[in-house]
Image (cartoon, coloured by chain):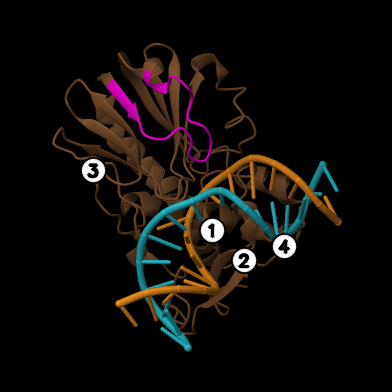
Chain colours: A brown, B cyan, C orange
DNA sequence: AAACGCGCCTGCGGGC
DNA sequence: TGCCCGCAGGCGCGTT
């Protein structure tokens, strides 16, 4: 489900939990995408949440006992604050109860999400993080970096910007939207892009993600933020899910094709 | 080593 | 009405 903007909004919404004590943890399955650690409850109960950050599409919840809860929402995961009257729902896999009597509920119908624990000193060597590329909204993601990374690459530019080793957080929606903004067709090959196009692409990715964050993310079907509210960026889509709809700029119809098994949307007139 | 395709899951909408 | 098919915000692994 969520790409960088959606996970970022959830991370921002969860900041109010920092300083709160976890009093009870209930896990309702042993395995989602991977095994949830044995004794997950015991390792997280009776701790204080000291920090919550996002890295790529992962959330990291730091605890006072030097344990970090890693959460990934996969395609269909949600992480929503509930009050003590909440009744467990289908596909709830984890419920964290706080001293304030708020609950944090992880729900994931498709179970592509991840719940794991690492120790504080394992972040750098963790297989989740060690090979990840830079955050797109930082200065490390710039033209020089991208040019260097793509100069010998023979794949399509769309698959490249969705590759976490090149840049994190750009999923299927924002890849199509960013390429539209940069006026680059998704099938173009990495090593064939001009300097000007790469510069435009870097700034298009940044502004697309920033604008999506401002709009509260994109809700296609089931994305909700930590307060169970939908996002609004889907109303600003230029191409995603717009097959056969008129392009806002040139009035030609938006096209769709499949790349890497994923739907890809573009305007043959506006993008070259 | 890079570059694809596939599978992991459930739910939903469309076509017959 | 109901069944079957295809498709859905991700990602890692196996095969070429």
Q: Which residue is mark 1?
A: A175
Label 2 to label 4: alpha-carbon separation: 8 Å
- Quick check: A142 left or right of A239? right
Toward the viewer: A209 or A128?
A128
At mark 2, the secondary structure is loop
Q: Which residue is mark 2?
A: A186
Q: Are marks 1 and 2 in contact (CB under 8 Å)?
A: yes
Give the dominant element type of the magenta stretch: helix, strand or loop. loop
At mark 3, the secondary structure is loop
Toward the viewer: A79 or A241?
A79
- Quick check: A60 left or right of A187? left
First along the sequence among labels 1 and 2: 1
Label 1 to label 4: alpha-carbon separation: 15 Å
First along the sequence among labels 1 and 3: 1
Q: Say which chain tag 3 marks.
A: A
Residue at 31%, 51% (x, y): give it: A216
**Which label number is shown at residue A227?**
3
Q: Is residue A64 visible?
A: yes
**For discs 1 and 3, the disc positioned in front in the rendered view:** 3
Q: Is residue A78 above or below residue A205?
A: above
The segment highlighted magenta reads: A24-41
- Categorize mark 3 by other alpha carbons within 10 Å: few (<14), some (14-19), many (20+): few
Q: Which residue is mark 4?
A: A189
């Amino acid at each position: 489900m969520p790409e960088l903007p959606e996970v970022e909004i959830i991370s921002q919404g969860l900041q109010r939990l920092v300083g709160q004590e976890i009093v009870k943890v209930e896990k309702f399955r042993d395995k989602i995408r991977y095994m949830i650690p044995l004794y997950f409850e015991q390792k997280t109960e009776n701790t204080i949440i000291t920090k919550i950050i996002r890295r790529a599409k992962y959330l990291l919840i730091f605890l006072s006992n030097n344990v970090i809860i890693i959460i990934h929402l996969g395609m269909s995961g949600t992480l929503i604050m509930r009050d003590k009257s909440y009744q467990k729902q289908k596909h709830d896999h984890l419920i964290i109860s706080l001293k304030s009597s708020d609950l944090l509920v992880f729900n994931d119908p498709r179970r592509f999400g991840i719940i794991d624990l690492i120790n504080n000193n394992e972040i750098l060597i963790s297989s989740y993080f060690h090979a990840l590329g830079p955050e797109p909204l930082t200065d490390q993601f710039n033209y020089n970096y991208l040019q260097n990374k793509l100069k010998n690459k023979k794949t399509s530019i769309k698959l490249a910007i969705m590759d976490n080793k090149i840049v994190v957080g750009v999923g299927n929606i924002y890849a199509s939207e960013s390429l539209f903004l940069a006026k680059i067709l998704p099938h173009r090959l990495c090593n064939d892009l001009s300097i000007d196009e790469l510069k435009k692409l870097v700034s298009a990715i940044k502004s697309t993600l920033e604008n999506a964050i401002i709009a509260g993310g994109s809700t296609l079907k089931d994305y909700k933020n930590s307060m169970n509210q939908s996002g609004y960026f889907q109303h600003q889509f230029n191409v995603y899910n717009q097959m056969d709809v008129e392009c806002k700029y040139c009035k030609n119809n938006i096209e769709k094709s499949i790349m890497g098994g994923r739907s890809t949307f573009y305007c043959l007139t506006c993008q070259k």
